[in-house]
Image (cartoon, rainbow, N blue to C red):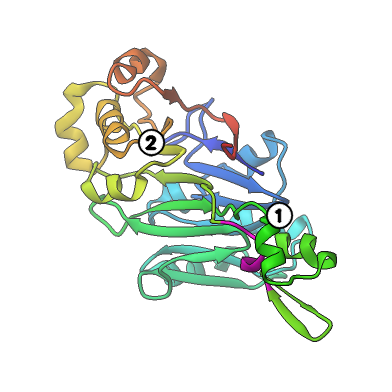
């Protein structure tokens, strides 16, 4: 099992000729989750050779244009690819008003929109083996980070299956399903599986000051995707004023959270060469990678 992660856009505030605005795609077993939908996201998705139709869930961090202004066109492109199933959109309080206003220019969608505001409508969303949990960031307006966790079941335990007198014919089914009805008897997957194993965790958080709450939610993530609005430490007053983070602060946060890997994203338009600050942030958190449009990686279960 694996998760495919693709940075579609790594820009903040406004796009550059080689940098679209914020967006990130996570794919799993024929389904996809999109984080943020800045202007140009549908173009970036096409350039990455991915599809609109499999995207079931959109997670919006906040309502600044560089994170949501691409939504109407994106939904229309989903329609043009033949999407008919409902689409879930998660975001801060105010999501319903904002999305309904944007969709004035995207009328007649052939699928419904399930709009969930955190924390009033949702605390976490379970979709198959994936669980998405929003949490509060700090940006001066309501702003969310997200954890995406991929569940991993325990190993098949033949002795446990025999102990519970589970028929051999349904062993395979119970490894894939929570319960199976066989010859009038209901059997649970817990009757044949051992303890749950470590899954995969991605934390996505952009447009925020570093906080203890973010550190707590990012704890032990396999991948932290976090904003690096400014590379120069002298920009700290500007970062505090605008509710953003420095590269160095991202490194310190990743270190404190004990994550495996840090991807930086959401750069200021004035930061045209983020690679210039790579060594500085790696001196704080060595397993840092400078994000760029189209960057992708597959995350696999550890043995």
Q: Nearer the viewer, residue 268 or 135?
A: 135
Gap in angstroms between the C-alphas marked 2 and 1: 29 Å
Percent position of residue 174, x then y: 73, 65
Can I make out residue 205 in this image? yes
Q: Secondary structure under badge 2?
A: loop
Q: Nearer the viewer, residue 275 or 271?
A: 275
Outermost residue, left direction? 237
Give the left or right position of residue 272, taking residue 162 as reference: left
The answer to whether residue 109 is above or below residue 152 is: below
Q: Nearer the viewer, residue 96 or 143?
A: 143
Q: Quarter of the image holding residue 286? A: top left
Q: Quarter of the image holding residue 242? A: top left
Q: Secondary structure under badge 1?
A: loop
- At a point 71% along the width and 68% down the height, the residue shown is 85
Give the left or right position of residue 29, taking residue 231 as reference: right
| Residue corresponding to mark 2 | 259
Task: Kindly report which numbered mark, 2 or 1, lies closer to the viewer in this rendering.
Answer: 2
Asked if the residue under mark 1 is in contact with the one under mark 2, i.e. CB atoms within 8 Å, the reply is no
Give the left or right position of residue 4, taking residue 132 as reference: right
Task: Kindly identify which numbered label has been placed on residue 54.
Answer: 1
- At a point 72% along the width and 80% down the height, the residue shown is 186
- At a point 48% along the width and 39% down the height, the residue shown is 21
Q: Does label 2 or label 1 sit earlier along the sequence?
A: 1
Outermost residue, bottom direction? 184
Tell me, yes or no, whether the highlighted magenta stretch contains residue 137: no
Q: Can you say which quadrant of the picture contains the N terminus? A: top right
Q: Residues within 10 Å of mark 2 (few under 14, many from 20)?
A: many
Percent position of residue 117, x then y: 41, 70
Q: What segment is highlighted magenta in the picture?
A: 188-194
- At a point 72% along the width and 70% down the height, the residue shown is 110
Q: Residues within 10 Å of mark 1 (few under 14, many from 20)?
A: some
Q: Can you say which quadrant of the picture contains the C terminus? A: top right
């Amino acid at each position: 099992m694996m998760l495919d992660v693709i940075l579609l856009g790594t820009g903040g505030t406004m796009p550059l000729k080689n940098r679209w605005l914020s967006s990130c795609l996570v794919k799993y077993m024929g389904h996809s989750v999109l984080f943020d939908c800045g202007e140009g996201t549908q173009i970036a998705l096409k350039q990455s050779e991915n599809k609109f139709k499999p995207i079931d869930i959109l997670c919006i961090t906040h309502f600044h244009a560089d994170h949501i202004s691409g939504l109407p066109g994106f939904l229309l492109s989903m329609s043009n690819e033949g999407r008919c199933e409902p689409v879930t959109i998660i975001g801060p309080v105010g999501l319903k008003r904002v999305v309904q206003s944007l969709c004035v220019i995207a009328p007649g969608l052939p699928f419904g929109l399930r709009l969930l505001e955190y924390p009033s409508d949702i605390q976490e969303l379970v979709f198959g083996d994936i669980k998405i949990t929003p949490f509060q960031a700090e940006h001066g307006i309501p702003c969310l980070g997200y954890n995406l966790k991929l569940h991993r079941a325990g190993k098949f335990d033949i002795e446990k299956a025999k102990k519970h007198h589970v028929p051999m014919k349904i062993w395979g089914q119970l490894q894939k399903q929570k319960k199976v009805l066989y010859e009038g008897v209901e059997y649970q997957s817990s009757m044949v599986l051992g303890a749950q194993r470590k899954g995969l965790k991605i934390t996505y958080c952009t447009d925020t000051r570093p906080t203890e709450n973010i550190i707590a939610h990012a704890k032990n993530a396999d991948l932290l995707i976090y904003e690096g609005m400014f590379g120069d430490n002298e920009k700290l007053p500007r970062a505090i004023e605008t509710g953003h983070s420095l590269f160095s602060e991202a490194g310190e946060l990743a270190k404190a959270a004990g994550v495996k890997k840090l991807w930086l994203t959401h750069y200021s338009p004035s930061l045209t060469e983020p690679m210039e600050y790579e060594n500085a942030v790696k001196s704080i958190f060595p397993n840092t990678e400078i994000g760029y449009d189209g960057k992708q990686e597959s995350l696999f279960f550890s043995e």
